[in-house]
Image (cartoon, helix red, strand yellow):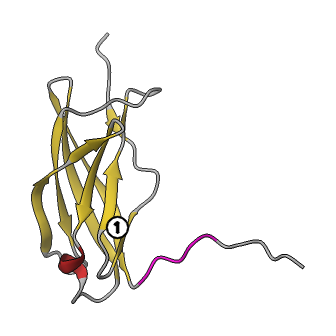
Amino acid sequence: MATEYQIEFRAPHIIEKGVATTIEAPVTNGADLVAPSAGTVTVYDGGGTKRVDAAAVTITGSIATYSVGAAITTSLSPASDWYAVWSLTVAGATLQARNQAAGVRRVVGAAQPLVR
């Protein structure tokens, strides 16, 4: 039986306005992380305009990543209907997947516990 691979997004991509933001696409074989050999990503803003067009990804720690440059988002308004289309090569086959994204004004850190 052939091994099946899939791109497993854990959450939508959050792309911060005016800040270089790394997005990622982990590939698994159902149990283990598998490094793609190559790939591209295309990022669309809320109006459907390509902001990144078939850019080459970087493989970091066995995960396909791409840094959306600050200049790409500086003049854009925040919107929750962005998306990214990934095309990754794994074991000679091409996997394609789309992930939701949001262009946000700023990323707020995790809440800190209240200490009294």
Residue 65 x/y as whole percent: 28, 50
What amino acid is labelled 1 in the image? Ala
Q: Where the C terminus falls, by quadrant?
A: bottom right
x 21%, y 89%: residue: 75
| Front in this rendered view, residue 25 or 82 | 25
State the residue lying farthest toward the top: 1
| Front in this rendered view, residue 91 or 70 | 70
Q: In this picture, is 105 found above or below 20?
A: below
x 29%, y 89%: residue: 77
x 32%, y 10%: residue: 1
x 13%, y 76%: residue: 49
State the residue lying farthest toward the right: 116
Dot 1, how many residues are within 10 Å of its Cα: few (below 14), some (14-19), or many (20+)? many
- Which residue corresponds to mark 1? 101
Q: In this picture, is 93 found above or below 41?
A: above
For the record, the magenta segment spans 106-110
| Front in this rendered view, residue 65 or 4 | 65
In the image, residue 107 lies in the stretch drawn in magenta:
yes
Residue 50 x/y as whole percent: 12, 70
Q: Which of the 4 image quarters holds residue 19?
A: bottom left
